[in-house]
Image: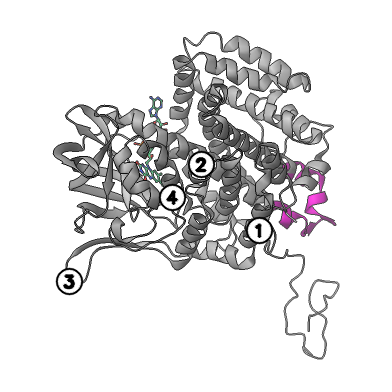
């Protein structure tokens, strides 16, 4: 029987509590956001998927959205992060095993991802909208558990690099593409499905991989191609239980890309030894490690001396997934904030109806929607790039811009969303601390902020038409919003002289990213959302906090559209 609240907030005395010993009734606290559909409850996602060519996947996405939003799956996401992986370097008899043990819930997310093809579907079932549909699935799954996205992304991203080496591709790609997740610590030959990691970063250089000192000594040809032994170290190797790693090492002809298996084809352990697991602030469910490579067998991928160019294919794909992951984090953060504020009252009204809070919520919702809209637009460019050089050029500039901007916005967004929940938002039993700790990671790995800006410069300098394609895409939204039109005109002027780009990199990339996001909003979002985005982000007033929006915007409509249920 529930207790009735007395006027002073305490319980009334009744038959069950005759002496009035119960201190209080819990009221004005929200119900958990669970058992909802991450697809059907996300208007921006549904519209974006349809707009960018993935509408054919809607029914399946709705089914996935229901499963991911169930209380049971959300609980698994919590468990995967409460129980971090553990490393056993040796077994109890002293044999080297390099075994990382994950919580079963982590494996469940890996299995779900692989069975849905998050690691391969655009390669195995290419069709218009394939990247869009995959991005939508990934976006929903990353909202529930972000850590396992790391090996899923690396496995997905390995295909373009491996495809360059026919013998390796023939042996490895069928199992990499299989929709079977097999976490066993056994040789690749004994498994029906494989995952791939990436080991580039060394102690003396992460962004500047040319500083790598790991040596590659040629040992002859075998069935997989040109074989080498690698001697050196890698300072960050995430998901070290992957079955093989794309890596870089100095071969006689210069820095070269390799595929190194965790087990040798003869069934012996390849000496890639895990020294320790990183103690990470976020991405906790997933392991990242420091490793020693003591004569590890590896096969060359691409020509000697072309390592950076070869592995860049992989890196470019991982950067796109960072856009998805950070957009996903923002969506979950604003969904939590909205759902809380629609149930919690303060000073006589639901928080969602308090004008100051409504402005904050609307601002957070705008950021999340714009991030998703650009991510799905880039997904369409990835779908079309093989047949359309302009889409290829667009992807080359929009992906680093998107990775730079979206990933950088996530931490501040997560923090503000946390504050919407008040004190409970900062408690470890709320989803918000996990979202907050996860938020900075995507900006740092796979090329940190400045590196993305320099990548934008590289794309423009290598192929000056890249900038024309970028502006042509933005111009498709011209004539609708005066702030955007004025902003783009000024930007075109400022981009004429790139002599001092590096010192202006952040300034110019901020503006390039914002104009792109604004144009995608104008082209795709309801007028209330597009107007608010342009008014708040393009009409410069210097630094501002979340919710500091100009007057006259339809904030109710923005908030309503973003409600998760
Ligand atoms: C959780 C986690 C997991 C990771 N997993 C992996 C993995 O699996 N495999 C892997 O290979 N790596 C991995 N990394 C490493 C990651 O990719 C690197 O940390 C990242 O590339 C940056 O390299 P660095 O740490 O050496 O920093 P540095 O390269 O020293 O960079 C430091 C700062 O300097 C800036 N900078 C660099 N060059 C320039 C320049 N020319 N101009 C201006 N600014 C510049 C960077 O933007 C950065 O802000 C992981 C990192 C994290 C946090």
Disc 1 versus disc 4: nearer the observer:
4
| Ligand 1 sits in quadrant | top left
Per the image, the residue denoted by label 2 is 321
- Residue at x-position 53% and y-position 63%: 78
Disc 4 versus disc 3: nearer the observer: 4
> In the rendering, at what x and y percent does residue 307 appear?
30, 31
Q: Which residue is labeled 4 in the image? A: 177
Q: Is residue 356 magenta?
A: yes
Q: Residues within 10 Å of mark 4 (few under 14, many from 20)?
A: many
Tell me which segment is drawn in magenta. Answer: 337-361
Q: Secondary structure at mark 4?
A: helix
| Nearer-N-terminus badge (4/3) | 3
Label 3 – label 1 distance at C-alpha: 47 Å
For mark 1, give the secondary structure. Answer: helix
Residue under pointer 1: 63
Residue 287 spot, x, y in % from top left? 38, 55
Spatial CA span between label 4 and label 3: 36 Å
């Amino acid at each position: 029987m529930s207790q009735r609240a007395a006027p002073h907030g305490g319980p009334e005395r009744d038959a069950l509590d005759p002496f009035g010993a119960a201190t209080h009734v819990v009221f004005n606290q929200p119900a958990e956001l669970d058992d909802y559909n991450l697809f059907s409850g996300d208007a921006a996602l549904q519209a974006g998927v349809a707009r960018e060519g993935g509408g054919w996947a809607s029914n399946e996405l709705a089914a996935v959205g229901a499963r991911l939003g169930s209380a049971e799956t959300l609980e698994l996401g919590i468990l995967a992060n409460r129980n971090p992986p553990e490393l056993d370097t040796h077994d109890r008899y002293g044999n080297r095993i390099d075994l990382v043990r994950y919580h079963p819930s982590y494996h469940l997310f890996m299995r779900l991802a692989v069975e849905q093809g998050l690691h391969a579907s655009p390669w195995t079932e290419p069709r218009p909208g394939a990247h869009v549909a995959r991005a939508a699935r990934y976006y929903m799954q990353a909202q529930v558990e972000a850590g396992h996205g790391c090996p899923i992304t690396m496995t997905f991203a390995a295909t373009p690099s491996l495809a360059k080496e026919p013998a390796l591709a023939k042996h490895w790609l069928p199992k990499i593409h299989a929709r079977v997740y097999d976490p066993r610590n056994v040789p690749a030959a004994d498994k029906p499905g494989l995952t791939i990691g990436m080991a580039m970063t060394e102690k003396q250089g992460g962004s500047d991989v040319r500083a790598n000192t790991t040596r590659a000594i040629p040992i002859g040809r075998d069935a997989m191609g040109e074989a080498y032994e690698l001697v050196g170290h890698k300072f960050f190797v995430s998901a070290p239980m992957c079955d093989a790693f794309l890596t870089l090492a100095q071969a006689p002809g210069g820095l070269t890309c390799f595929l190194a298996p965790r087990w040798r084809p003869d069934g012996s352990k390849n000496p890639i030894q895990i020294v320790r697991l990183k103690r990470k602030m976020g991405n906790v469910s997933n392991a990242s490690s420091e490793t020693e490579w003591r004569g590890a067998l590896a096969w060359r991928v691409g020509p000697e001396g072309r390592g950076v160019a070869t592995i860049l294919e992989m890196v470019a794909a991982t950067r796109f997934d960072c856009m998805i992951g950070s957009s996903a984090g923002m969506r979950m953060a604003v969904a939590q904030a909205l759902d809380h504020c629609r149930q919690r009252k303060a000073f006589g009204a639901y928080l969602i109806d308090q004008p100051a809070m409504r402005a904050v919520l609307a601002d957070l919702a705008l950021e999340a929607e714009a991030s998703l809209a650009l991510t799905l637009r880039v997904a369409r460019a990835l779908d079309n790039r093989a047949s359309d050089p302009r889409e290829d050029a667009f992807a080359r500039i929009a992906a680093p811009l998107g990775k730079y901007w979206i990933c950088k916005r996530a931490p501040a967004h997560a923090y503000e969303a946390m504050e919407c929940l008040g004190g409970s938002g900062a408690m470890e039993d709320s989803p918000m601390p996990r979202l907050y700790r996860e938020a900075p990671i995507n900006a740092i790995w796979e090329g940190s902020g400045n590196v993305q800006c320099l990548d934008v410069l590289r794309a423009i300098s290598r192929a000056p038409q890249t900038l024309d394609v970028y502006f042509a895409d933005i111009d498709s939204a011209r004539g609708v919003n005066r702030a955007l039109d004025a902003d783009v005109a000024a930007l075109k002027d400022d981009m004429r002289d790139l002599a001092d780009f590096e010192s202006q990199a952040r300034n110019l990339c901020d503006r390039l990213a914002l104009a792109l996001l604004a144009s995608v909003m104008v082209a795709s979002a309801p007028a209330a959302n597009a107007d608010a985005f342009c008014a708040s982000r393009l009409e410069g007033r210097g630094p501002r906090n979340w919710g500091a929006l100009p007057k006259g915007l339809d904030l109710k409509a923005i908030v309503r559209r973003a409600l998760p249920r």
